[in-house]
Amino acid sequence: MASYLFTGGRVLERNAEGLLDGVDVLIEDNRIKEVSDTPIKSTTAERIDLKGKTLMPGLIDAHVHVVASMVDLSQNAALPSSLAALRAARIMNGMLMRGFTTVRDVAGADLGLKRAVEEGLIEGPRLVICGKALGQTGGHTDFRGRSDDRGAFEGRLGALGRICDGVSSVRRAAREEIKAGAEFIKIMANGGVASPNDPIHALGYSRDEIKAIVEEAANAGTYVSAHLYTDEAIRRAVECGVHSLEHCNLIKQETAGLAVEAGAVACPTLVAYEGLALEGAAFGLGPESIAKIETVRRGGMESLDIMRKAGLPMAFGTDLLGQLHKFQSMEFEIRARVLPISEILVSATRISAQLCRMDGEIGVITAGAFADLLVVDGDPTKDLRVLQDEGRHLAAIIKDGRFYKNALM
Ligand code: ZN
Ligand code: ZN
């Protein structure tokens, strides 16, 4: 049984508004055993003097696609599943080494990848999965060209979504994903950037279909997450009972208020558009997709302010594809142009934990929570750049009580 006592550091305060001196943290096995502002005594734990460094909860990215090893999602869907899995392992390792100890995969990852992490076959973050996203014919999971009437690559791990139409088919699809281990259900309820035939303004699914999927998720004790950009699509999703509102770039004030009343959570993913604009074309994003980026990129920055004013909780998401995963931590810097640092840190910990349905278990330093911790060289409440640069300022990365990086000695 591994046990460590962290002492001599400064611990991130619950609301990320500052650092607390003189707090000891004891971890035992994979859990935090004790947090105390008086010295903790332990005869068995290995004592680690943090020498003034910051101890904070592991980060949580609530919008990733670990099987997206290519920007061109159509080609990604055609990859052999074994290759897609091995590439996913490398992508997941990159996330862990940037300090993300949990990620919510919102289309693509399956139970095999989740179990591979749990069994220690992959050194990656905890994985919360939804299996394949549900999308309609011609929607955001349909990567076939206009005159391409082949079946979609649904059986492949590299396919982020599946195509299903009609109330009975979407119910069945939702039930199949839940049976296969989905912890929530993802739907494509609006047009998207990385798919060829659906303009941003297009609505995905009828109200009846969305309500049916929401009912199936609720029957299984979970929620629906929807891919959404336009105000109209977001409002409709909220009215139909969708809980996790992805992207939300073009949301307006009134809809943000309705989302608050409904208890929904938004998950902006601004770095996705920065990344695609910077290097998307070089990695195979088609011209019809490039043209769509600007629409959502411009709205994205304004949306943060609108959602903040409304009091809509925001999780932390990135939504990067393929070679663009290296930009994951840039989401901090983009949000900091608009939001207070403390709120960004709470997004990347406690609020994202809610969408993982692991409230109180991850994203917090409290007795009983999983021992997912970062030791940061610097004060993230003053400067978020200490969480960037591919994890360079992280002196230690601990997940489930185990060190994945340790530069403390
Ligand atoms: Zn999306
Ligand atoms: Zn996405």
Image: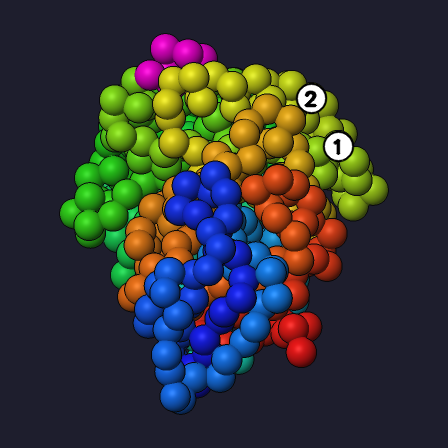
Q: Quadrant of residue 313?
A: top left
Does the image show residue 268? yes
Q: Amino acid at mark 1?
A: Ala
- Residue to which mark 2 is pinned: 294
**Disc 1 element:** helix
Determine the residue positioned at 65% across, 65% down.
Answer: 395
Q: How are the colours assigned in the image?
A: rainbow
Task: Identify the residue at the far right of this view.
Answer: 282
How far across and down, in percent of the image, does residue 156 sit?
A: 53, 61
Residue 256 is covered by the magenta coloring: yes
Which of 355 and 152 lies nearest the eye of the viewer? 355
Determine the residue positioned at 64% across, 26% down.
Answer: 337
Which of 238 and 211 lies nearest the eye of the viewer? 238
Q: Where does the magenta region start and end? A: 252-257
Does the image show residue 1? no
How many C-alpha atoms fall within 10 Å of the one at disc 1: few (<14), some, or many (≥20)? some
> Which image quarter holds the N terminus?
bottom left
How far across and down, in percent of the image, does residue 9 sit?
A: 54, 62
- Residue to which mark 1 is pinned: 277
The dominant secondary structure in magenta is: helix
Confirm if mark 2 falls within 8 A of ligand 1. Answer: no
Determine the residue positioned at 57% across, 57% down.
Answer: 54
Task: Identify the residue at the far left of this view.
Answer: 219
Q: Are marks 1 and 2 in contact (CB under 8 Å)?
A: yes
